[in-house]
Image (spheres, helix red, strand yellow):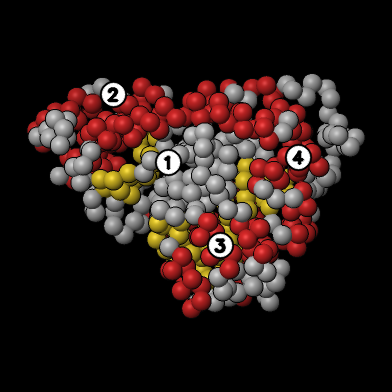
Amino acid sequence: MSGTQSQTKEQLQKRYQDAKGRGLNLDMTRGKPCSEQLDLSLGMLDCLGRDYKAADGTDCRNYGVLDGLPEAKQLFAEVLEVTSAEIIVAGNSSLALMHDAVAAALLLGVPGGSRSWRDQTIKFLCPTPGYDRHFAICQHLGIEMVTVDMTDEGPNMGQVERLVAADASIKGIWCVPRYSNPTGIVFSPAVVERLATMKAAPDFRVFWDNAYAVHHLTDKPQPLKNLLAACKAAGNADRVLTFGSTSKVSFAGGGVAMVAASEANIAYMKRNMSFQTIGHDKLNQLRHVRFFGDMAGIEAHMKKHAAILKPKFDAVTAILDRELGESGVARWTRPEGGYFVSIDTREGCAKAVVAMAAEAGVKLTNAGATFPYGKDPLDRNIRIAPSMPSLAEIQQAMELVAICIRLIGS
């Protein structure tokens, strides 16, 4: 154990009090892009000039084109690895698309289903730790959540398959397949294949939130097997709904959201959408197409994001390595993309660590947020969001967090 790791409790308490005396006020609760990242897309604000016509002559200032401009569909179909016929390009929020998909299923059912979900007891599988906003949708709409363990390859498929086979009321599973929130893992090809081929009801849906499809921190990202293609090959084309957005590519408040699925699902969602709007913001879609140009343009842009983010992620893991090392009081992930680092403390310690850090001026995501109903049964998981603070602030915050973990866990 290094000298840093072997410090006495009294020495750690002094370091904590010194940090507390610095008057820190750092917020690491959510994965927001920092200002430097948002600045990367400033050219999007004026790239249209007064040329508001789409490639086919559509006046983007007017109503219409419910499923998205053809050039926007072509661009983002490449991002999600589908065809233009298998995607809808919509407004700015993929979370809204997910909420609407669940709400529509409750009210109206889904293609291939015999009746609406509202006539049944409905449950969703929730791999944990996972994304709190997915769980919030279920809780808001009265859907019971059933936890399954998250492994280094994705959800524990043995658990998933047993639960789905035994309980017909399980109608969905939430997945963040690339750089999963918060663990940062990428689903393995075997997990993707089992999700596509497992026995499930015709109205079972995989909510495939591919939020970090292009958010790599390395030059050699792990591949992600295409779930829609696997589902089609298995005769289960309608099983998956894939969601994405540019919220952390361009502007967090002004991106473009999209949903990809089988053509039957797309037709169904388009019809439901026609009662909500006559058309989404086509000017914003056109801005994105003009600014990025093509997939190569998006990839080049994301390398600029990585140059800003990677030093922050490196600082998080370097400080945890230095301060905690092999002490046994915690373990943490080393993501190669996405927006989060996941820390598991000793059981029964996470809430106390978060509270202690907050008392010294560092706000973390609430302990338990990565579990359904906000309840981590082992009280050990903490989600770290390094994107928003500066590198210097990250270093200060993570030193404090590590000290709190040592003090609480020892």
For the point 46% across and 65% down, which residue is it?
Answer: 157
- Residue 155, percent across and down? 45, 59
For the point 15% across and 44% down, which residue is it?
Answer: 410
Between the C-alphas of marks 2 and 3, the distance is 51 Å
Mark seen at residue 72: 4
For the point 52% across and 33% down, which residue is it?
Answer: 219
**Disc 4 residue type?**
Ala
For the point 9% across and 34% down, which residue is it?
Answer: 8
In the figure, residue 305 lies in which quadrant?
Answer: top right
Badge 3 is on which residue? 193
Q: Secondary structure at mark 1?
A: loop
Disc number lying in front (2 or 3): 3
**Disc 2 residue type?**
Gly
Say if 402 sits above or below 175 in the image: above
Between the C-alphas of marks 2 and 1, the distance is 30 Å
Between the C-alphas of marks 3 and 4, the distance is 29 Å
- Residue 332, percent across and down? 32, 44
Badge 1 is on which residue? 335
Q: Which residue occupies the foreground of this view, 129 or 317?
A: 317
Between the C-alphas of marks 3 and 1, the distance is 23 Å
Mark positioned earlier in the residue sequence (2 or 1): 2
Disc number lying in front (2 or 4): 4
Mark positioned earlier in the residue sequence (2 or 3): 2
